[in-house]
Amino acid sequence: MEVLNDLLGYRDLKIFQNTEWFSFSLDSVLLPNFVTLNKNIDVIMDLGCGNAPIPLILSTKTNAKIIGVEIQKDSYDLAKKTIFYNKLENRIELLNVDMKELKNIYPGDTIDVITCNPPYFKYLGTSNLNEDEHKIIARHEKMITLEEIVLLSRYLLKNNGVLAMVHRTDRLIEIISLFQKYGLEVKKLRFVYPKVNIESNMILIEGRKNGKTGLKLLPPLYVHYEDGSYTEEVLRMFE
């Protein structure tokens, strides 16, 4: 069922969602609050934007042009309705294409910042066969792999451009290896923990194309207090 919800505590922003599919999650809030933005940025691209929570939040933080790319037509349609409802069509452009086709649409070295909340799990063919196709594509690397995303980002980014990603902690070594393989120097890393004294389950990582060496390891981010309520830092991201 399609519903129109408030975008957390962001003033006057609404988002269309389908209750039978993926609703946007905390990951989509953490990433736009992590990525490095400055006044010299002209173009940001969000790969796999879904119904556009990350472009929406980014629009409150920057005046740069934002491009959202989404392969699934149903999610793209929700995103489009959301952008028009919020009167952001002059700020946010949406593309309903396979990411792999972006090389045929954009020349290399044209994007300042790329954000991506990619599928977290490798696709094995037998993965979660009871799920519908929409959820399989959102969760598993069926349409594009992590390596293909990093390689594509390398192509699209300007020299010294930034790729920021949220992913599972258990794939951190693989992510760092791929960043290094394609000339994206890891510059910023933050571990996300559900609670104190519980292992990290997510990471926020940022690489810079042909960047100088030098990693900034940020303080841990705790999502919940012991009673299950959100920590003050997370609540500030909702505003």
Image (spheres, helix red, strand yellow):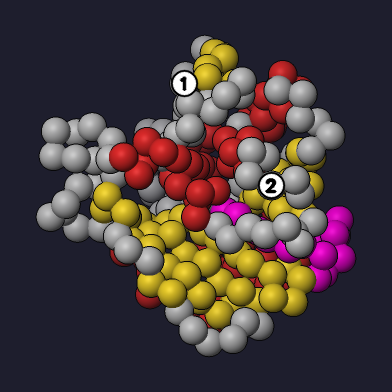
Indicate the secondary structure of the residue bearing disc 2: loop
Q: Which label is found at residue 20? A: 1
Q: Residue furthest bottom?
A: 213
Residue at image location 76% in from the left, 49% down from the top: 64
Q: Nearer the viewer, residue 75 or 49?
A: 49
Disc nearer the start of the sequence (2/1) = 1
Q: Which label is found at residue 144? A: none
What is the total number of numbered labels drawn onto the structure image?
Answer: 2
Q: Is residue 162 left or right of residue 88?
A: left
* Quadrant housing residue 203: bottom left
Is residue 9 one of those drawn in magenta?
Answer: no
Q: Identify residue type, mark 1.
A: Glu
* Residues at circles 2 and 1 in contact by the CB criterion of under 8 Å: no
Return the residue at label 2: 62
Compared to 222, does 163 lie above or below?
below
Q: Is residue 117 left or right of residue 199?
A: right
Q: Is residue 175 visible?
A: no
The magenta span reads 102-116
Cα–Cα span, label 2 and label 1: 32 Å
Residue at image location 53% in from the left, 34% down from the top: 134
